[in-house]
Image (cartoon, rainbow, N blue to C red):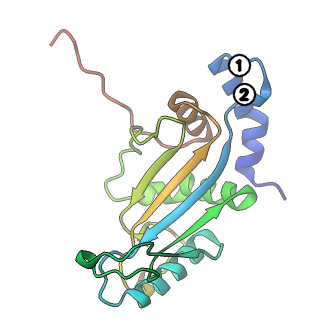
Amino acid sequence: MTPTLQTFYKEKVVDQLKKELGLTNIHEVPALEKIVVTTHVGSASDRKQAVEDAVEEIARITGQKPSVAYAKKSVANFKVREGEAVGARVTLRNEHMWEFLDRFINITAANIRDFRGISPKSFDGRGNYAMGIKDQSIFPEVELDQIKRNIGFDLIFVTTGGTNEKGFALLKALGMPFRETKKADSAA
C-alpha cells in the first residue's frame, strides 16, 4: 500500500512545484531521495551501553534497524579509540521514508518544546535540509518511562532539488512546518 504522503506528492505536489518553479520537464521537479537519522553518544562513560540504547531508540522511532558508527581515529582528548562504537545511523528510503516524514510533520514536530516552526536556515546549498533534535521524547513511539538517557538526533532530508530554493519549495509543499522569516523594516 502506498503511503498517504507519497500519494499526495505524486498527485498534487508535482504539478504545484512544476508551476511554482516554472519547470517544463516532470523529471526536473525536486523529489525526496532519502532521510538519514543519526546520533552520536558523545563522551558517555558507559559508551557501549549508550550505543546499544541509541540503536534501540532509533529502531523504535524509524521502524528500521540502524547501523553502528565506529570511530575512524583515536582521539585522546575525547577518550575515543579507533574502532570503538560511537553512534548509530539509519537511512530511510521509499515507504519507510514517506511514513516517517508523514509522522514527523503531522505528529512529532508539534511535540517539540516551545515549537514555533522549523528554522528554514539549515539548507546546505544543494537543496538538502538538516536539523537537530535534542531528545527522543518528542517521538510518540518512545515510552517516556522507558527512557534510560536523553539521546539527541540529527535528521537529514536529502532531495534532488539541487538548489536551496527547490529543496525549500519541496519540503514546504509536503507540509514541513517552517517558521515564517521576519523581514526587517527598511523605513525603521
Residue at x 49% of width, y 65% of height = 38
Looking at the rendered structure, the kind of residue marked 1 is Leu
Q: Is residue 149 left or right of residue 20?
A: left
Q: Position of residue 182 (x, y in %)?
A: 30, 27
Using the rendered view, name the quadrant where residue 20 is placed. Answer: top right
Residue 117, image x, y percentages: 40, 44
Q: Are marks 2 and 1 in contact (CB under 8 Å)?
A: yes
Q: Which residue is mark 2?
A: 28
Q: Residue at x 53, y 58 (%)?
A: 107
Would residue 85 be found to the left or right of residue 78 on screen?
right
Q: Residue 135: image x %, image y %?
A: 38, 69
Q: Is residue 66 above or below residue 127?
A: below
Please tell me whether mark 2 sits on a helix, a strand or a loop.
helix
**Considering the numbered disc 1 on the image, is that residue within a helix, a strand or a loop?**
loop
Distance of label 2 from label 1 (alpha carbons): 7 Å
Residue 65 numbered mark, or none: none
In the image as oriented, which residue stretches furthest toward the right? 1
Picture layout, residue 140 above or below residue 111: below
User: Which of the numbered marks, if any, corresponds to residue 23?
Assistant: 1
Q: Quadrant of residue 75?
A: bottom left
Residue nearer the viewer, 183 or 77 = 77
Residue at 24% over, 20% down? 184
Q: Residues within 10 Å of mark 2 (few under 14, many from 20)?
A: some
Q: Amino acid at mark 2?
A: Glu
- For label 1, the crowd category at 10 Å Cα-Cα, with few meaning under 14, some 14 to 19 and many 20 or more, is few
